[in-house]
Amino acid sequence: MELRQQCLNLLALRDPMAKAQAVSALNRMGSIDFTREFAEPPGIPGRSERPPLVPHTSIKTGSLATPRGHAALVHSIVHIEKNAIDLALDICWRFAGMPEAFYRDWLQVAFEESYHFTLLREHLLTLGFDYGDFPAHDGLWSMAERTRGDILARVALVPRTLEARGLDASPAVKTKLVSIGDHRAGEILDIILRDEIGHVAIGNRWYGWLCAQRGLDPVATYAELTVKYEAPKLKRPFNLDARRAAGFSDAELTALQAE
C-alpha cells in the first residue's frame, strides 16, 4: 500500500502502543503518491480513552520526591512523544504536492518518535505506572488542528515552534530527573534531544524551501504566522546551541531573543 495512505491508516489507530509498533515496522522506502488529495475521515487522530485530556492548566505532576510525582513527569514526556508520532503521520498524508524528500523526512521522524515513545513508556513501566495513568493535555495537537489547511504554517509552528521548545526544555527536565537518581531517564532524554535537533532541522529546511518558493522573508513571515495562528509565546532560557544545530539562522535567533 502507498505510504501516505498507510500514514493516514496508522494515524487512525486508537491504541498508542499498537500505533508505535506499526510505525516502527513501516517500510519507509515504499512508494509515495505525491499528488493524491485525501478527504479527511472522522476520528483522527485515533485515541484511546486514556489518558483523559484536560486543560494544560489542570496538569499537576506533584513533587518529584514522591514516586507518583516522578512518574507523572515521565508520563508527561511520554505523552509528548505520542503526539509527535501523530503529528509526523498527519503531515505526511495531509499535504499533497511536495517533493518526495519531504515525505521521506517525515516518515523518518515518525519512526524516531515511535522509538522515543517506546523507550519512555518502557521506563515508565519500571516506575510502576503506564501510559494513560495520568491526565494529559492536547496542546500539541491543537496547533495541528489550527494549521490543517496551511502547510507553511504547519512547518513553521509545529516543528519550528512547539518541538523547538522541547530543545529549550530538555536540559532542565533532565537535570530534575537525574537529581532524584533517575539516570535512565537522563539517558533517554539525551537520545531524544539528539534526534529532536534533527526533527527541528527538517522543519527549518522545509520552512525555508517553502518561503523561497513563495518569495517570502522567513523572519517576517514567521512573526506574522505566530500572530495569525495564536502560537504560544516562547519563554527563556533558550537552548541556543541546539537551535543553531537545528538550523535556525542568526537572524531568527536574534528575533527570538528580542521578543
Image (spheres, rainbow, N blue to C red):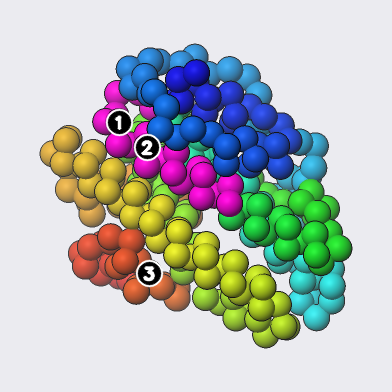
- For image coordinates 61% across by 74% down, the residue present is 186
Quarter holding the C terminus?
bottom left
In the foreground, 33 or 140: 33
Disc sitting over residue 242 in the figure: 3
Numbered disc in front, either 1 or 3: 1
Q: Are marks 2 and 1 in contact (CB under 8 Å)?
A: yes
What x and y, as percent, mark residue 127?
Answer: 81, 66
Label 1 and label 3: CA atoms lie apart by 27 Å
**143, above or below 255, in the image:** above
Mark closer to the chain start, 3 or 2: 2
Disc sitting over residue 104 in the figure: 2
What segment carries the magenta color? 95-115
Kind of residue sitting beneath label 2: Arg
Instruction: Indicate left or right for 163 with 25 as reference.
Output: left
Numbered disc in front, either 3 or 2: 2
Q: Secondary structure at mark 2?
A: helix
Query: Where does label 1 land, which residue?
Result: 100
**206, above or below 115, in the image:** above
